Image: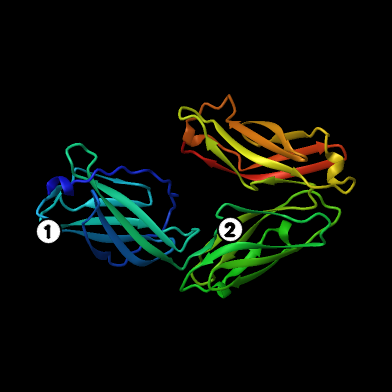
Amino acid sequence: MLNRLLGVLLFSYAACPVMAMPEDKSEPIVTRVLIEERGPALVANADLGALEAGKTVQVTLRLVNESDFSFPVLRMQTTCNCVRVASEGSEIPARGSLDLALSIEVPRNSKTPEETLSFSIFYGESGMEGIEVSVNYGIAGLVSFKNVLSHHTTAPIGAKSHTFRIPVLVTKPVELGQIEFSKADSLKDLKVAPKENQAAQWLDCTLPIDPTRSESLIGRVWMKHPTSGELSEINLVIEINQPCTVAPSILRFKKTDAEQESYEASAILRIVSTAASKPSENQGRDVDLEWWVAQGKLHCTKKQIAANIYRLHFSWRPDPLTSEPEAKVIRPSEINGRVLSGALRANLTLPLVFESHL
């Protein structure tokens, strides 16, 4: 029976953002959860209901052990820094319980209205046998753009206006209709209308287009709940009259070396057309590319995979003179490029995301 109860659990680590949040001064939430067997593993699942966005909430988690075996608490390990756990005892007694004090940082920006965090209580002599505890909660009063970093859109060539959607997430007790919107001066002509149905919430955006403009339009959009003060912002990048497109519109640089700062990303460049030429007129012409960033060294190679379609491979490293540790290395937030091919002339700006885990 004892062997059946002792499960070997391996856990992966996920990054959670660290945010300075106001602490909830109310009484701690007390939740009773039962330790159960799931196959060879031991688990405990708690549901805290709805927690207020942007707050640090105190929870007392009472782990109940109905088995005839006690579990010493040798160590505890969380999967993110959005929760801190402290045990009020050294073991979970047989036919008894143990209280855990949890401090949970509820995010104020999220892509989903629910969150799940987990931590492990290791008790076995091998150091790998443990109880996996999962804590689920909903986020109340959330005011967030679903694309947390930026939103990228491309206006059709020759269009007099461009209409697009920006997905958002607003949860009870806040209503989408209560939200106030503002925008940067560069987006002064942008019209924003909040919309929702049973499945989604979004902003209907319309922008009149200057037919002589060919550079990207970049600026921030803010939304704020006037009562709670919850505020969210997003960087908006609109490509206008561009004769070529790059997919994905947000480049994700992944780390390639565990020992040093080295990142790579891939994308597809597609030539659409220009005011002076048709796409077919660019076939057979070589494409000259120039890319640059504000920080570090960027290198790009290209390979043609079809008519007017190229695969791009980017690599980025910090400046060779940088001697700071990894945590202090400044990474660029966007990449700028120039595409030249025959009559084609295009300037591009793409947001960047760096993923530090291998």
Residue position marked by numbered label 2 in the rendering? 233
Residue located farthest toward the top when viewing the structure as drawn: 321
Q: Is residue 184 left or right of residue 85?
A: right
Which of disc 2 and disc 1 is earlier in sequence? 1
Tell me the tag on residue 19: none
Q: Nearer the viewer, residue 332 or 357?
A: 357
* Residue 233, picture quadrant: bottom right
Residue located farthest toward the right when viewing the structure as drawn: 276
Circle 1: element type: strand
Q: Is residue 57 above or below residue 13?
A: below
At 37% from the left and 48% from the top, the residue drawn is 81
Q: Nearer the viewer, residue 118 or 56?
A: 118
Tell me the tag on residue 96: 1
Q: Is residue 81 above or below residue 55?
A: above
Q: Position of residue 208 (x, y in %)?
A: 79, 63
Q: Is residue 303 above or below residue 36?
A: above
Q: Position of residue 333 (x, y in %)?
A: 61, 43
Residue type highlighted by circle 2 = Glu
Q: Nearer the viewer, residue 333 or 159?
A: 159
At 28% from the left and 67% from the top, the residue drawn is 27
- Few, some or many residues within 10 Å of mark 2 (<14, 14–19, 20+): many
Mark 1 vs mark 2: give the one in front. 1
Q: Is residue 82 left or right of residue 96?
A: right
- Few, some or many residues within 10 Å of mark 1 (<14, 14–19, 20+): some
Q: Position of residue 3 (x, y in %)?
A: 15, 45
Circle 2: element type: strand
* Residue 194, picture quadrant: bottom right
Residue type highlighted by circle 1 = Gly
At 44% from the left and 58% from the top, the residue drawn is 107
**Mark pair 1, 2: CA separation:** 48 Å
